[in-house]
Amino acid sequence: MSGYVDAHHHIWRVQDLPWLSGPMIPRIFGPYEALQKRDYLAAEYGADAAAHGFTQSVYTQANWPLDRSVDEVKWVQSQHEETGRPSAIVGSADLFSPRASETFDAQIAASPLMRGCRLQVHWHEHEAFRFAKSADAMLDPIFNENLERIAERGWVFELQAFPNQLPYVKELLGNHPDLTFVIIHAGMPIEGEPWREFLHELAQFPNLNVKLSGQGTFIHRVDPEWIKTVTQVVVDEFGSGRAVFGTNFPVESIWTDFSSLVNAWFGVLAGFPQDVQDDILGRTARRIYRLEEA
């Protein structure tokens, strides 16, 4: 394999993100004052990534205001033109609006890197972990119509949900067999919650893939043993051909640095067969996000 793929990262200017430039609001990753202090641009990300062998990457939307979803793509495209990074864009749109297709078309016009959409629909009993208005918001008819439009464009939908949303996630996946889904942060496992059962139930849907990312989100540290546990469950349930790795940087910089994070994952993956490593660190992502071999 000629280089690794980071299938989940962000870049940003603080000025574009009210959740960063304004007062802190509850987020699943906890207090984030460190993120509010400065921009994280493609040049800095590229230096971090290149030092560890990442030759391609997938930008995942960073919660710009939804009415600026096209501006987000235009800005990320400009960063790509300056630096060569990222290699693909997963944007966002108001999927509860009947006009979302207009946003999709404008994003395609703005960048040839468009590969998918994420609108967070996770909901949890813990109020600070909520993003969607309800646990079953993903079953909204307009939302589902827009998922059909995403499938028509050959994009992926990046799904963010908790184990307590299992019945709704299963219904959603079953309703869209022709749409490629990628579930974020390995289903956001929290120790003490039924996340293993969640992944076991979801593995039956062949259109669902898994991002091995964000495993410091709820524990606020890099824990190789936890990473190993989650990775083993994902490989056992889904196989490495449906798993990709993402750094989730710079969010993870709240509690670690890029090198420590990546080296922990590399150390865990080194315990798996080479073919599994090749899938998770590049081959699967290149297929899902239609990346040219770097």
Image (cartoon, rainbow, N blue to C red):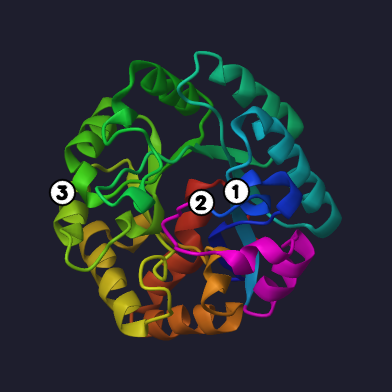
Residue 80 disc label = none
Q: Quadrant of residue 140?
A: top left
Return the disc, 1 or 3, that comes first in the chain's sequence: 1
Mark 2: few, some, or many residues within 10 Å (few <14, many ≥20)?
Answer: few
Dot 3 falls on a residue whose secondary structure is helix
Image point (45%, 22%), residue name: 96
Residue that label 2 marks: 25
Q: Which residues are magenta?
A: 25-52
For discs 3 and 2, the disc positioned in front in the rendered view: 2
Image spot of residue 160 (x, y percent): 38, 46
Say how many tags the image has. Answer: 3
Q: Is residue 112 above or below residue 29?
A: above
Image point (73%, 57%), residue name: 85
Mark 3: few, some, or many residues within 10 Å (few <14, many ≥20)?
Answer: some
**Disc 1 from disc 2: Cα separation:** 7 Å
Amino acid on which disc 2 is placed: Ile
Image point (63%, 53%), residue name: 20
**Disc 1 from disc 3: Cα separation:** 34 Å
Amino acid on which disc 3 is placed: Glu
Return the disc, 1 or 2, that comes first in the chain's sequence: 1
Dot 2 falls on a residue whose secondary structure is loop
109 inside magenta stretch: no
Camera-side residue of 167 and 152? 167
Camera-side residue of 238 and 104? 104
Look at the image and tell me in which quarter the C terminus lies.
bottom right
Image spot of residue 119 (x, y percent): 47, 37
Residue that label 3 marks: 201
